[in-house]
Amino acid sequence: MQPTRHSRTSLPWWRGRGLVIGVPYAWLLLFFLAPFLIVAKYSISEMGDVRVEDLVTYANGAVKLAAKYTNYVTVFTDSLYFNAYLASLKYALCTTLCCLAIGYPFAYFMARARASVQALLLMLVMLPFWTSFLLRVYAWKGLLDEGGWVANAIVGLHLDQALLAMGLIEAPGQLMHTTFSLLVGMTYTYLPFMILPLYANLSKMDLRLLEAASDLGATPWVAFWRVTVPMSIAGIVAGSMLVFIPCVGEYVTPELLGGPQTLMIGRVIWDENFSNNDPPMASTIAVVLVLLIVVPLALFNRYQARVEEATK
Amino acid sequence: MNTSADNAKFLQIQDVVKDFAGYKAVNNVSLDIAKGEIFALLGSSGCGKTTLLRMLAGFETPTSGRIVLNGQDLAGIAPYDRPLNMMFQSYALFPHLSVWDNIAFGLRREKLPKDTVAERVEAMLKLVQLGKFGKRKPHQLSGGQQQRVALARSLAKQPQLLLLDEPLGALDKKLREETQIELVNIIHSVGVTCVMVTHDQEEAMTMTSRIAVMSEGRFLQVGSPAEIYETPATRFVADFIGNVNLMDGKVTVDEPDHVVIDSADCRHYVGHGITGTLGMPVAVALRPEKIALQRARPTGEFNAVSGTIQELSYFGATTVFRVKLASGQVLAVSMANTERHLDDAFARGDTVWATWSPQAHVVLTH
């Protein structure tokens, strides 16, 4: 008999493993799943005078089910919502690509740096978390506004012409409240979430594989694309998910740094709820948004499971 | 390609030094390796053998000295441009690629036509008897199969020189013995010149035509397995290769056809041609299997010593006795078990005589 195994299985469920897993699950059930179900219920409810009506009512001896699907029909037919979703996905995708383009080389060289330098670089990546996210986004306002340092530098180098040509800003010298300022803010905010999983992945890589590639005639450039990148796919996927998913529903950054043409879905939810006073519509948009995010997340989890099985 | 290159000097290592910040990992070694030879660099970990191999592959640059392969100085040639391939310790197979793609990796870098690549990969899979495993990923193979994929991958480009870094180190003992012969057969059938690094003397002796014993960055002795075993040049080599009994002594008789060496427990009559000066301190090396045990006192005063059996280890084919001599030295004696049962078998505590022939010794001066 193995005593350790015996003692593990004989623990009551509320102790040991059950407790460790159970507490966060209970937390999520209470504060994520329950509110989500309330939102989901709102989304198919009628608007009463002031309050949202109950889904199931009992009147005159009959049960009346008052589910209303018109909100969902509206979401999928009104181009306002469609365009806002599309814009959110577009900006999230652009942000993810920017983060990947900046984060991958950074993570790569961090993983290859000397151990003492690695620790320092890692701390620098984490450093922004020591200041409130809101403050840092506000700081970008100051940097990008007319007369701000970054704005001066960009205008001074005539880079604003290039941005204008790319359609990222509307007028030369006008950097704030544009697609450009939005992407700068979101890329800045989410960059660490790209770097950390990539770094974790790249620093684990067996460098002898690169020697093997070199031995077999691959130049460092070829070895990078044929060995390093394919082997870091799991890190790329993890980092991209960590950036993409929160970016889709981002509200604060577009609100502070974006402009009228960068209408994202977070803003639409706010408007429906507080300007239009239509919580069911806001809830519908939120539910569709969650579904939009859950699908790629599920795909990601399946991919991770497959990778884990492959490397076992 | 340089056709005038001398086949006996196919690979030349000339005065090669590798200095790691003041520590000489490889300290001025020179060596010529003939075309088609299988050569082993043998030594314990940290002796510099792997550093030397990595300099051949191009992963390390010699601090000084030259490495010339087939008439071409390899200095300044990047690893990916060298006409040699290496089989890495624990193989370094690409985990994201199938067996087929692993073997094709090097061929594709040469921009060969697709048909040629496919043809060569299939030929390699056949060579290492993995024809059906092309689509598998490395992790789906056993250790022995992975080893064969690694071999196929390193032979696919038909290199002029094959480097093997501890080729069988990751396999268990039984599989290792089988694979040794298989590996040698494949290397011979391809006809590639081969330099391997190993810490396993058995592996080096069964697989190679010549061995360099390395210690502290230097070659202590270079020779065939039999030369290194039967005529070790130094105490270190004698001790490192196989088991040996070393007895310190002094030359007391020096005649043209023999010398006599007196050691603490016995007098050695050495019948083969060595010369020395009287009184010269030497060490006599005796392999355990060259000593025999008997109960009766032998006639003559030379090459015999009595002692008590302190310990015996039964290995099936042989039994190793540890005989304690008067001086306190313990003599290892290995005897073949040619009979199934012996009524008069030696047992612990028995007093016995150990004897050996005048040809059994190796006399070492350093």
Image (tube, coloured by chain):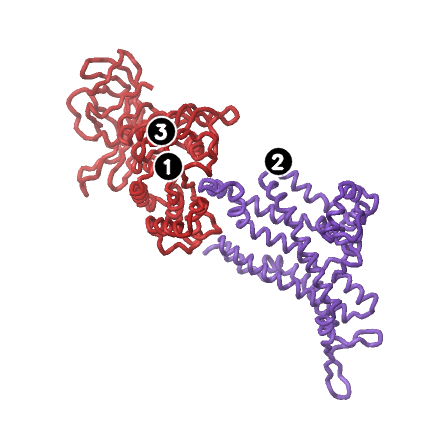
Chain colours: A purple, B red
Q: Secondary structure at mark 2?
A: helix
Q: Secondary structure at mark 1?
A: strand
Residue kind at label 1, given as amino acid type = Leu
Residue holding disc 2: A116
Q: Quadrant of the N terminus of chain B?
A: top left
Residue holding disc 1: B161
C-beta proximity under 8 Å, tags 1 and 3: no
Q: Are marks 1 and 3 on the same chain?
A: yes
Left-right relation of B325 to A79: left
How packed mark 3 is, by other alpha carbons closer than 10 Å (few <14, some 14-19, many 20 or more), is: many
Tell me which residue sits at (31%, 15%) in the image. B281
The chain that hosts pointer 1 is B
Residue B212: percent from left, percent from top: 35, 29
Q: CA distance from mark 3 to mark 2?
A: 38 Å
Residue holding disc 3: B213
Tell me which residue sits at (51%, 47%) in the image. A227
- Res. A176 visible in picture: yes
Task: State the residue lying farthest toward the top.
Answer: B278
Q: Nearer the viewer, mark 1 or mark 3?
A: 1
Q: CA distance from mark 2 to mark 1?
A: 39 Å
Q: Nearer the viewer, mark 2 or mark 1?
A: 1
Q: Quadrant of residue B196?
A: top left
Q: Secondary structure at mark 3?
A: strand
Tell me which residue sits at (33%, 24%) in the image. B235
Residue A106: percent from left, percent from top: 63, 43
The chain that hosts pointer 3 is B
Relative to A292, is A232 above or below?
above
How packed mark 1 is, by other alpha carbons closer than 10 Å (few <14, some 14-19, many 20 or more), is: many
The chain that hosts pointer 2 is A
Relative to A260, is B37 above or below?
above
